Image (cartoon, rainbow, N blue to C red):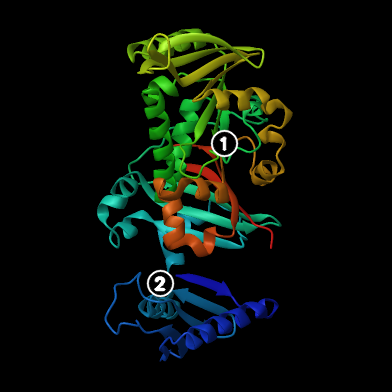
Amino acid sequence: MFASDRQPRCSSGARIFAAFWQKQAIAGANLTFEQFAGVKIIYSENPTGTNSPIGTQPPAMALVGNRFVLFANHPKVLRDAINNVQAPELGLSNTATYERAIEQFPKRQMGVAFVNFAALSGLLDKTQVADLSQRYESLAAALKFDRQGLLADTVLLAASGQTLPTAKPPLDRSVGALKFIPATSPLAAGGEDLRQFRTEIAQGIEPYKPLAEFVDRLQTDLEARWSLQPEDLFDWVTGEFALGMVAPIERKAVPDWIFVTERKSNTSEQLARFDEIAGDRGLSIVALTLDDQAVTTWTKLSTEANSRSSEGVDLKAEVQGVRASVGKYEILATSVEAMRQALNAHSEPITESENFEQAIAALDRPNDGYLYLDWPTIERISGDRIPLARLARIAAKPVLENVRSLTVTSYGSGPTLQRGAVYFRLKDT
């Protein structure tokens, strides 16, 4: 359910609500006007005339006095909400779980979102939230609009008997490794200490199931490209790092990736490990020069019959990975073209992109780094291959169609809670 304060300064909102129901009536909706405990409830009957489960009904709305407008996905939810006002002890604001979550924020907020995972597991398929309700008690978000979009400062509270790992955010400066990610990259992540970053971000987005599935799918795809396990690919990185997607030109093509890490004492050993894994897969280690930069490729060599060739065969070389050392950084890419873009990104890096700068401007420091998505581009190139894009077209389109980008960060965690933020930068209207 959603409640909005309908003060005179927001009278335009009331006109929008009235216009909504007028459009519903013009479209042929069978509107019902119900008086419940002195409050008018408006909702649209199911067009099939059959009973539908909560969650599939058309929306319902109620006007409470001259101040509040209530929205819900079913009139029963509104009736329960009105009863709660008349019996305050039943209201959410008087529960210990809600009070514990809300006291983490300043007293005055534009809006608040709250999820009780134990209660949610009783409404949804328990397998979807079982792990969450065992580890976390609740999620609360304080909402704030700025001129560019919507900021949600989030707090995940540990469930009773659970202790979260203590982690202090390491970053109070820009990430130098991001200078190798081109400004056109629709997805970028940057930070320091990749193991902590993965843990903090993964825990922070876990309640947002589609986004969590999206990130898991990206990690799985990248691991499959290089036949590497997560500990081989990520967990050895203790310095700066950056990850960027190179958008394909063709819609259905698989995107390329750029991964950058700051060189540390264990870096040479890990790169040798990568070469060993490539050799075990039957790939050849080939040294090349790319734009005056020495690079090493992992190349699959094969032959193909060709009657026009003097030898009767052609030698084919398929590059499956490229790495290079530039300054204090090591760069890995999934193709020669992706490596070329990384080497040339210094002229127009993502850190100097207006879109990226505005996407992180509202987020506090220190933090654990950023996960940034240029949403329209991600949706365009992903199609049905990525769960979040599919969900947006089906269920969340009215919201996400106005999103220019979204950025996730974490502010660290203590024994009882984890703090973070999600920033939705909206399209210009």
Local secondary structure at mark 1: strand
Instruction: Quadrant for residue 215, please give it.
Output: top left
Disc 1 from disc 2: Cα separation: 46 Å
Does the rendering let one see residue 259? Answer: yes
Nearest to N terminus: mark 1 or mark 2:
2
Identify whether 378 is placed above or below 107.
above
- Which amino acid is tagged 1? Ala
Instruction: Quadrant for residue 86, please give it.
Output: bottom left
Does the rendering let one see residue 207? Answer: no
CA neighbours of label 2 inside 10 A, class few (<14), some (14 to 19), many (20+): few
Instruction: Quadrant for residue 298, please give it.
Output: top left
Identify whether 161 is placed above or below 197.
below
Work out which quarter of the rendered image holds the N terminus and state it.
bottom left
Identify whether 384 is placed above or below 222.
below
Work out which quarter of the rendered image holds the C terminus and state it.
bottom right
Please state the horizontal and vertical placement of residue 403, each as a whole percent of the image. 58, 55
Residue occupying the point 57% across, 26% down = 337
Q: Which mark is residue 188?
A: 1
